[in-house]
Image (cartoon, helix red, strand yellow):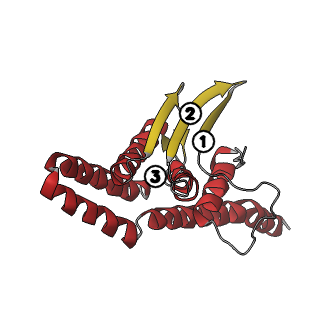
Amino acid sequence: QICIQFFVFYNVVYGNFFENRIKLEHSLISVSQSQIQPHFVNNVLYNIKVLYQSEPERAERMLNNLSKFLKGNKDAFDTVSHHPFERELEHIECYLEIEKERFDNISVVYDIAIKNFSVPPLILQPIVENSIQHGLRAKKSGGTIRISTWEKDGKIFISVKDDGVGFDVTKPKDTKRKHLGIENTKFRIEKICNGTMDVKSI
């Protein structure tokens, strides 16, 4: 009877733990791989090649940011659970510097009131990329991304806002369309931080 009870306890508690652990690792791998898409790297390398002919300093800066960005994705595999927010911020800064070089109508504002905390790795990347791809690039004049952090009532908040085209809040969600990066980010925030993630258009 004791052995049976232990077996049930093991399967319910530890089984769930290992199942969630595997899901977390797989979600991190999926997010990391989605950020190193061949077309993104190829486009950036082409931009660097063109810039080297006319503006070598910009090309060098872009190449350095690409190197740091790719290293940040690789390092994320060594930190499945969490890492310092400062490290996360450095990674997204490299990505945004690359995008600013590629699209001169994109600007970034950082409003960081607190950064002495930890987050799951690569949680900003899918959200920021979504803002650029579906918000700012869909708007001819481009726009601004604002990344903010603050603390209230013992909780830490991270906000990513853009002034792009937004989306129709009255339109039913397209359940057939998979936003893997966003869904994985939400999953890891809930499981690792016991937090929540909201997406809305105003």
Residue lying at the far bottom in this picture: please name it. 176
Residue where numbered disc 2 is placed: 148
At label 2, which amino acid type do we have? Ser
Residue where numbered disc 1 is placed: 161
Instruction: Say left or right for 187 vs 82.
Output: right
Instruction: Say left or right for 153 vs 136.
Output: right
Residue 130 quadrant: bottom right
How packed is label 3: few (under 14 Cα within 10 Å), some, or many (20 or more)?
few
Q: Give the quarter of the figure containing the C terminus.
A: top right
Residue where numbered disc 3 is placed: 79
Q: Earlier in the sequence, mark 1 or mark 2?
A: 2
Q: Work out whether 45 lies above or below 198.
A: below
Query: Can residue 115 be seen by looking at this rendering?
Result: no
At label 1, which amino acid type do we have? Lys
Q: CA distance from mark 1 to mark 2?
A: 8 Å
Secondary structure, mark 2, is strand
Secondary structure, mark 1, is strand
Q: CA distance from mark 2 to mark 3?
A: 23 Å
Q: CA distance from mark 3 to mark 1?
A: 27 Å
Tell which tag, 1 or 2, sits nearer the viewer. 1
Q: Position of residue 86 (x, y in %)?
A: 44, 36
Q: Nearer the viewer, residue 187 or 9?
A: 187
Q: At x 73% / y 24%, what residue is drawn?
A: 153
How packed is label 2: few (under 14 Cα within 10 Å), some, or many (20 or more)?
some
Q: At x 37% / y 48%, what residue is drawn?
A: 104
